Amino acid sequence: MTHDPLLAARAASLHDLSARRLADAAAVSVLEQAVSQRRWWLLQWADGAAFVAGLVAQDLQDTLFDHGVRWPRCTACEQTAEHSLSLEPALDPAPRWVCSESGIDVAPLGELR
């Protein structure tokens, strides 16, 4: 069986959407678009396979934000203002969700609770 990095990227983001109760039809449609767009990117740069999961998650996060949805929302710190987690480092084979306000390392991509 061949490992498809785009299927793994989709699964990781879908898990994190579900963990934060946002895996509705609209969000999953945005996720499918992100995967589709990164398929072309991956065809152009096959060595980027290790980084595609983080890029799909960032594309999803950016598009949801453009639609007024903060994802994933931080539940790890005591900040009163609603804010999102950031995916760090940007290009890494193992990106992690980090609180953008406090710097708390919350979870690896695909492992939010």
Image (spheres, helix red, strand yellow):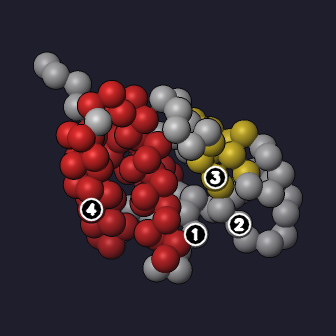
| Circle on res. 33 | 4
Query: Residue at horizontal 73%, vertical 71%?
Result: 82
Q: Which residue is mark 2?
A: 83
In this view, the mark in front (4 or 2): 4
Nearer the N terminus, badge 3 or badge 4? 4
Tell me where residue 91 appears, x and y as whole percent. 52, 38
Splitting the image into 4 quarters, where does residue 27 fall? bottom left
Provide the secondary structure element on which disc 2 rests.
Answer: loop
Closest to the observer, 14 or 6 = 6
Give the residue type that dot 4 points to. Answer: Gln
Q: CA distance from mark 1 to mark 4?
A: 18 Å
Query: Residue at horizontal 69%, vertical 46%?
Result: 98
Q: CA distance from mark 3 to mark 1?
A: 11 Å
Tell me where residue 24 appears, x and y as whole percent. 35, 68
In this view, the mark in front (3 or 1): 3
Give the residue type that dot 3 points to. Answer: Ser
Q: Is residue 70 left or right of residue 105?
A: left
| Circle on res. 86 | 3
Mark 4 surroundings within 10 Å by alpha-carbon count, few (fewer than 14), some (14 through 19), many (20 or more): some
Give the residue type that dot 2 points to. Answer: His
| Circle on res. 30 | none
Nearer the N terminus, badge 1 or badge 4? 4
Give the residue type that dot 1 points to. Answer: Arg
Task: Reply above or below: 52 against 57.
Answer: above
Q: CA distance from mark 3 to mark 2?
A: 10 Å
- Look at the image and tell me whether residue 47 can be seen: yes
Callouts 1 and 2 close, C-beta under 8 Å: yes
Mark 1 surroundings within 10 Å by alpha-carbon count, few (fewer than 14), some (14 through 19), many (20 or more): some
Task: Reply above or below: 18 against 92.
Answer: below
